[in-house]
Image (spheres, helix red, strand yellow):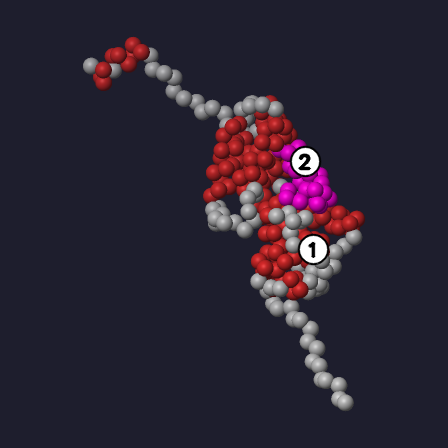
């Protein structure tokens, strides 16, 4: 008796489907968190079956790593071999550190801490805050992943604390200290606390919220928020003194 002729076809990886799965996984991990996210949730949002997700990532941990490295613009995952296979924890920690060191550049902030002339301090401060705001926008997905998954992925949040947040706040506090001491910016409190407030306000205003972006981002948002933050250290403008009451009484308008 002849054996039945069976055609075996490997499931194909359709072009663009990887991007759909990454976008769906990013939304799930940033919204629900790593522990509560199920592959079925990612698949449903991407419009594929759960089995299809495993063509692109070996498991949920690998999928998270893939999404994270994409959000940090790592060249390691620009054209990954599929299914993507996770690295061991030690190697992954080094990889996250390398990614953050590669992208965490704030040249205006660095130059500001090196300058020893303090003219135009408020304009310089606004420029530094705008630079930070644009960086937070660009790497919003990675920041959300770190914040939302602090307990499931401590190596990620610790890397952000070590490489980004502590360095940015330290440099910004140094900038504010020198300008406040020189009288170029208003002294409104401890410079370290002011720096912490500025960073927290930018992150809260530009990063926090659903990664899906239910409302379109407006480019002007950064400028408005930065203006509000910078106003706290702006020196009071000179104003004309109150006119002498006697002179007012003699003015033609009072006759």
Does residue 115 appear in the picture of this structure? no
How crowded is the residue under tag 2: few (<14 C-alpha within 10 Å), some, or many (20+)?
Answer: few
Task: Determine whether the residue tagged by mark 2 lies in a helix, strand or loop.
Answer: helix
Q: Residue furthest left?
A: 255
Segment tinted magenta in the rendering: 146-172
Question: Which quadrant of the figure has residue 23?
Answer: bottom right
Q: Earlier in the sequence, mark 2 or mark 1?
A: 1
Q: Which residue is mark 2?
A: 166
Residue 59 place in picture, x, y as percent: 71, 58
Query: What's the residue at 64%, 47% (across, down)?
Result: 33
Vertical arrangement, residue 183 with respect to residue 138, above or below: above
Question: Which quadrant of the figure has residue 160?
Answer: top right
Is residue 223 shown left or right of residue 246?
Answer: right
In depth, the one of 142 and 136 nearer the eye is 142
Which disc, if any, is residue 60? 1
Is residue 210 shown left or right of residue 11?
Answer: left
What is the magenta segment's predominant secondary structure? Answer: helix
Residue 202 place in picture, x, y as percent: 56, 38
Q: Residue furthest bottom?
A: 1
Query: In which quadrant will I find the N terminus?
Result: bottom right
Task: Determine whether the residue tagged by mark 1 lies in a helix, strand or loop.
Answer: helix
């Amino acid at each position: 008796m002849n054996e039945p002729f069976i055609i075996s076809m490997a499931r194909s990886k359709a072009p663009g489907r990887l991007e759909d799965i990454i976008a769906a996984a990013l939304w799930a991990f940033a919204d629900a968190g790593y522990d509560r996210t199920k592959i079925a949730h990612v698949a449903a949002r991407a419009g594929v079956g759960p089995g299809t997700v495993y063509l692109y990532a070996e498991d949920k941990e690998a999928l998270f790593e893939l999404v994270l490295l994409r959000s940090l613009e790592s060249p390691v995952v620009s054209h990954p071999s599929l299914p993507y296979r996770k690295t061991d924890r030690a190697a992954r920690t080094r990889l996250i550190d390398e990614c953050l060191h590669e992208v965490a550049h704030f040249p205006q902030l660095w130059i500001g801490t090196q300058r020893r002339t303090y003219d135009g301090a408020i304009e310089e401060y606004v420029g530094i805050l705008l630079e930070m705001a644009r960086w937070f926008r660009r790497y919003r997905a990675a920041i959300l992943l770190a914040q939302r998954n602090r307990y499931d992925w401590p190596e990620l949040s610790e890397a952000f604390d070590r490489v980004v947040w502590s360095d940015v706040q330290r440099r910004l506090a140094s900038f504010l200290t020198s300008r406040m001491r020189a009288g170029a910016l208003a002294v409104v409190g401890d410079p370290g606390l002011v720096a912490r407030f500025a960073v927290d306000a930018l992150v809260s205003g530009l990063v926090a919220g659903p990664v899906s972006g239910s409302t379109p981002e407006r480019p002007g948002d950064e400028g408005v928020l930065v203006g509000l933050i910078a106003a706290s250290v702006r020196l009071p403008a000179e104003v004309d003194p109150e006119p002498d009451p006697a002179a007012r009484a003699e003015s033609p308008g009072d006759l």
